[in-house]
Image (spheres, helix red, strand yellow):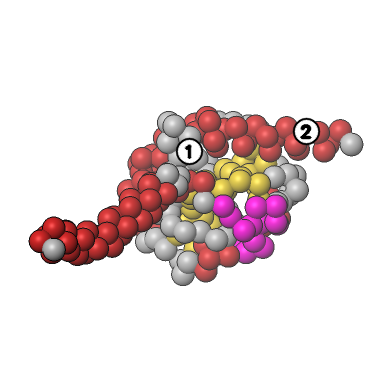
Amino acid sequence: MTEQLSASPQRRSWLIVLPLIVFLALAALFLFRLGDRDPSRIPSALIGHPAPQTSLPPLHGLLSNGAQVPGLDPANFMGKVSVVNVWASWCVPCHEEAPFLTELAKDNRLQLIGINYKDAPDGSRRFLSRYGNPFASVGVDGNGRAAIEWGVYGVPETFIVGRNGKIVYKLVGPITPDNIDSALGAEIDKAVSAASISRKF
């Protein structure tokens, strides 16, 4: 009888601790799955679909060889592989990725297009003056509506648009030394190769 009474409190304490153990195990599993997710690999519903047909005005006062750099014209996506970068001068990672955009701009297989997101014109011009303007055209998305149409989660984001005007890849987050060759560069190569093959037929 004495043994039964002494075992009973131990059993009760075990029943109290069991839900806590289950909760901690579920929390650990959730954190593991969350940490395993690479934010740059978030899929886009627009992959395989035509780029949004949204025209955007130019960044007034942004000049190249004395001429105004044009805004975003969706017709320019047809016929050449395009890299579309959504950026802003107030975005810290945008400053960090600027040198990589300058490198990409040297690749004559593609055109680099900027979407300037909810930014002050003076700040945008200062940003491009500081790092150099890698973009063939810069469209101003002052109210963020174009970014919504492109399915942008936040700046910076980069899209690859194939020669046929369809989005083939999306990079969420900044271009970095880790992804410029392994992810973005590889996808650019694929898009250029696909464009070359389609021209032969």
- Residue 151 higher or lower than 129, as above or below: below
Asked if residue 199 shows in the view, the reply is yes
- Assess whether residue 70 is covered by the magenta stretch: no
- Residue 185 higher or lower than 114, as above or below: above
- Residue at 48%, 35% in the rendered image: 179
Q: CA distance from mark 1 to mark 2?
A: 23 Å
Judged from the image, the secondary structure of the residue bearing numbered disc 1 is helix
Q: Position of residue 112 (x, y in %)?
A: 57, 43
Q: Position of residue 89 (x, y in %)?
A: 36, 52
Residue 15: quarter of image = bottom left
Work out which residue is located at the far right of the displayed protein and give it: 201
Specify few, some or many for label 2: CA neighbours under 10 Å numbering under 14, 14-19, or 20 or more: few
From the image, which quarter does the C terminus lie in? top right
Mark 1 vs mark 2, foreground winner is 2
Bounds of the magenta segment: 43-55
Q: Nearer the viewer, residue 43 or 61?
A: 43
Task: Indicate which disc residue 196 carries.
Answer: 2
Tell me: 131 left or right of 163.
left
Proximity of marks 1 and 2: CB atoms separated by less than 8 Å: no
Residue type, mark 1 in image: Leu
Q: Nearer the viewer, residue 181 or 42?
A: 42
Q: Position of residue 116 (x, y in %)?
A: 47, 56
- Residue at 21%, 61% in the rendered image: 11
Q: Nearer the viewer, residue 84 or 66?
A: 84
Task: Indicate which disc residue 101 carries.
Answer: 1
Judged from the image, the secondary structure of the residue bearing numbered disc 2 is helix
Residue type, mark 2 in image: Ser
